[in-house]
């Protein structure tokens, strides 16, 4: 993974932590939990941090989704 991608993931974790009132460690742990759930669509961590899975992570963190659903 290149620096830009790591930085984007890091900023996503920081934003989610601020928005949820949870620690960055807690946010990262929840994202890992979702990514590791084999019943879910993907095991890619980025899917939940910066892509279409973000609303699922926000829901898990009890954040009102800021993204429209299709």
Image (cartoon, rainbow, N blue to C red):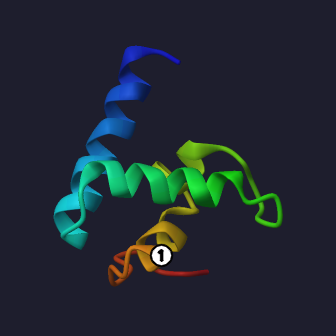
Above or below 45: residue 26: below
Q: Between residues 64 and 37, which one lies in front from this camera angle? A: 37
Q: Between residues 20 and 70, which one lies in front from this camera angle? A: 20
The number of numbered badges drawn on the structure is 1
| Residue displayed at 77% across by 61% down | 41
Q: Viewed as shown, does residue 48 lie left or right of 58?
A: right
Q: Position of residue 45 (x, y in %)?
A: 58, 45
| Residue displayed at 48% across by 63% down | 54
Q: Between residues 60 and 52, which one lies in front from this camera angle? A: 60
Q: Position of residue 56 (x, y in %)?
A: 54, 72
- Counting other residues with Cα less than 10 Å from the Cα at mark 1, is it few (<14), some (14-19), or many (20 or more)? some
| Residue displayed at 48% across by 67% down | 57
* Residue at the farthest right position: 39
| Residue displayed at 40% across by 27% down | 6
Q: Viewed as shown, does residue 60 lie left or right of 45?
A: left
Above or below 16: residue 62: below
Above or below 17: residue 9: above
Q: Quadrant of the C terminus?
A: bottom right
> In terms of image quadrants, where is residue 40?
bottom right
Which structural element holds mark 1? helix
> In terms of image quadrants, where is residue 33?
bottom right
Q: Position of residue 1 (x, y in %)?
A: 53, 18
Residue labelled with disc 1: 60
């Amino acid at each position: 993974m290149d620096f830009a991608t790591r930085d984007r993931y890091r900023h996503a974790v920081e934003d989610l932590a601020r928005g949820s009132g949870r620690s960055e460690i807690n946010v990262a742990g929840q994202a890992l939990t979702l990514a590791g759930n084999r019943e879910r669509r993907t095991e890619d961590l980025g899917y939940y941090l910066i892509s279409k899975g973000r609303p699922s992570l926000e829901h898990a963190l009890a954040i009102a989704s800021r993204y429209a659903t299709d």
